[in-house]
Image: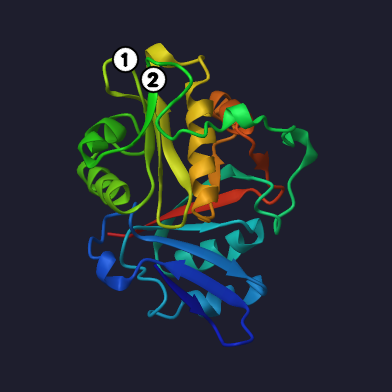
Amino acid sequence: MEVLVDSWPEYQTVIIRPQKQEMTDDMDPYTNVYRVFSKEPQKLQEVLKNCGVINWKQMFQIQVCQESLGEEIKAIAFSKSVKVNYSKLLLYLTEHSPELKVSTKSKPGSRREADHPDDGSESGDPNFKFSQLDVCHSALVNDNWDIGQNEKSLRYIQRCIQTLPAFCLQGPEGHPVTWATMDPSCEVGMAYTLDRYRSKGKLRQLLGHFMKYLRQENIPFYLSVLEENEKSCRAVEGSGFSVASCGWHQWICSPGK
């Protein structure tokens, strides 16, 4: 990843993006992702119009925690004949992310040490054990990722698993029954539990293990969930996450033909 600012050391806008050599596929919205923060939303258009910042000829995503940036993003997209598809999600943080305020409606209670097993390989049930997700599991993750299931998403998943933390809970047969990965911005995602193991607390157990590892390694993390995905929201909140008041906002931008 690389970080761009409009000026230094006094800056108003920050943009995080993959290095340019990573964004070689013009139709890959999984890799081509920009995270944006601005103290002056009214001046954002001026920054984004710079051809050296965003490649508007590609398909890409913009992700922000400031809903106020939406009008500026849509305006410049319209000026460049780019189609925009907007989604609003819940942004989840933990007490270890103190800079953003969290709402009290889902503030977690005290966490028992038993929720974070000391032994990285044991889950408390001899039929299940924690394990690192292997790149050979990429197809399984891709097949069950609701915004994946294509060759571009498979390539992206393979890269994430190869280079970033990713964990699973293996079942009695030795195969993953639930898993979660991390993307280049440190978002924990692609979490999924196979149907026969749902409603048993397996994902919550895995997230607790994942969070303990990330804290030990001093790796920041967050995640986002569609508000209507109630089961995932319950699992996330039961793992010690709280809803940030700002929300999480995504725009998928597609260039005109």
Q: Compare residues 154 and 85 and report the one nearer the observer.
A: 154
Residue at figure coordinates x 50%, y 14% from the top left: 200
Task: Give the quarter of the image for residue 114.
Answer: top right
Q: Compare residues 154 and 168 and report the one nearer the observer.
A: 168
Q: Which residue is mark 2?
A: 128
Residue 5 position in % (x across, y down): 52, 79
Q: Is residue 47 above or below residue 62?
A: below
Labelled disc at residue 22: none
Q: Which residue is mark 1?
A: 172
Residue at figure coordinates x 46%, y 64% from the top left: 77
Q: Compare residues 155 and 39 and report the one nearer the observer.
A: 155
Mark 2 lies on a secondary structure that is: loop
Q: Distance of mark 2 from mark 1, alpha carbons?
A: 6 Å
Label 2 close to label 1 by CB (< 8 Å): yes
Q: Amino acid at mark 1?
A: Pro
Q: Is residue 100 left or right of residue 60?
A: right
Q: Amino acid at mark 2?
A: Phe
Any part of residue 116 in sight:
yes
Residue 167 position in % (x across, y down): 38, 37
The quarter of the image holding the N terminus is bottom left
